[in-house]
Image (cartoon, grey):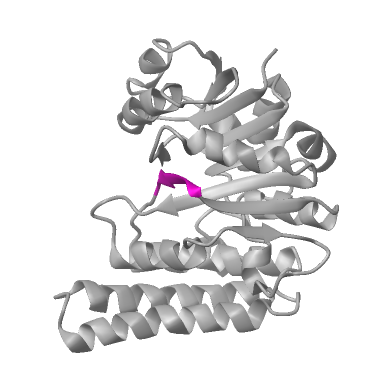
Amino acid sequence: MVALSVLLLTRNGSRDLERLLPALYAQESVPAFEVIAVDSGSTDGTLNLLKTFPLQLERIPSEAFHHACTRNSAATLARGEILVFLSQDAIPTSKDWLRKLISNFDDPNVGAVYGRQIAKPGSAAERQDTLDTVYGTRRLVKDPAHHNGLGYRFYHFSDANSAIRRSVWQQTRFPENLKVFEDLGIAKRILDSGWKIVYDPEASVYHSHNYSSFGLFKRYFDIGYTLKLLKIWEVPGTRKSLCRDAWKLISRKVKRARDGNSDQSAWQGIRHDIAKSFGFFLGLNEDRIPISVKRHLSAFRVFG
């Protein structure tokens, strides 16, 4: 009997997987679990590395990959009652990561759980500050009976480090009309169906990516568009809380720049935050932008 299924989507990730896979199989005090890796066209050493571990390997062409569809397909292969979704570059910080993640399902009303993401050493100031703000050290129980005063964080969820009850996934599934931010889409479905979602900071992983200012602009253009598409932007408290945290982030970097404590990193962070805010605003108002222009502004080609 398999209690847990760990689902990995991989592509050319051998360098990170060399750290992730040993950390995964070193997890302590957890029930028996299976690992299913779905690889979408790796050309480095990923496939050879995966074959050295006791896991189920499935292969699809790179052009067949879709953030929502591929995750749904991987889940159909799983036998576990709890589906654990983990990005190939999300490295557990301890041998208790999995135990802490799944312990939240002791509450039968919890449908999904996600853990903290800590910026990798050497990450840009923008990533460190953003991850610290969005995640943080306080455990949260998101109860659809009330929004807990969380604002935009109520619907926040990341499948880079998460777990979902199989029965809940079967009821909701990742929305395949979304090309990206499928985790935001399924979180809204889960909460709107009456299930709780828990954020547990003790179930933490190292996971971050550095972006250019234009890369952040394009990414947040898509975030703004998705929040509007899912009607999260209209939820009471979302606008106020997002504006509050955006102001806190940029104010923190301005203070660092004035204090002269961090050479050019603070100024770079300010540029990053301005790019994010501008992209986000345009994403919210994408209906006023010609389709030919939107295609160039989107990081994930959500407009074809």
Q: Is residue 231 left or right of residue 182?
A: right
Q: Place residue 236 in its image quadrant.
A: bottom right
Q: State yes or no: residue 97 in magenta.
A: no
Q: Is residue 26 above or below residue 179?
A: above
Q: Is residue 7 above or below residue 261?
A: above
What is the magenta range?
202-207
Residue at image point 69% right, 45% down = 112
Residue at image point 48% right, 64% down = 218
Q: Place residue 72 in its image quadrant.
A: top right
Q: Position of residue 303 (x, y in %)?
A: 63, 57
Q: Position of residue 231 (x, y in %)?
A: 76, 68
Q: Is residue 221 left or right of residue 92?
A: right
Q: Place residue 38 in its image quadrant.
A: top right
Q: Position of residue 275 (x, y in %)?
A: 41, 75
Q: Is residue 182 left or right of residue 235?
A: left
Please state which of residues 264 and 187 is positioned toward the viewer in this rendering.
Answer: 187
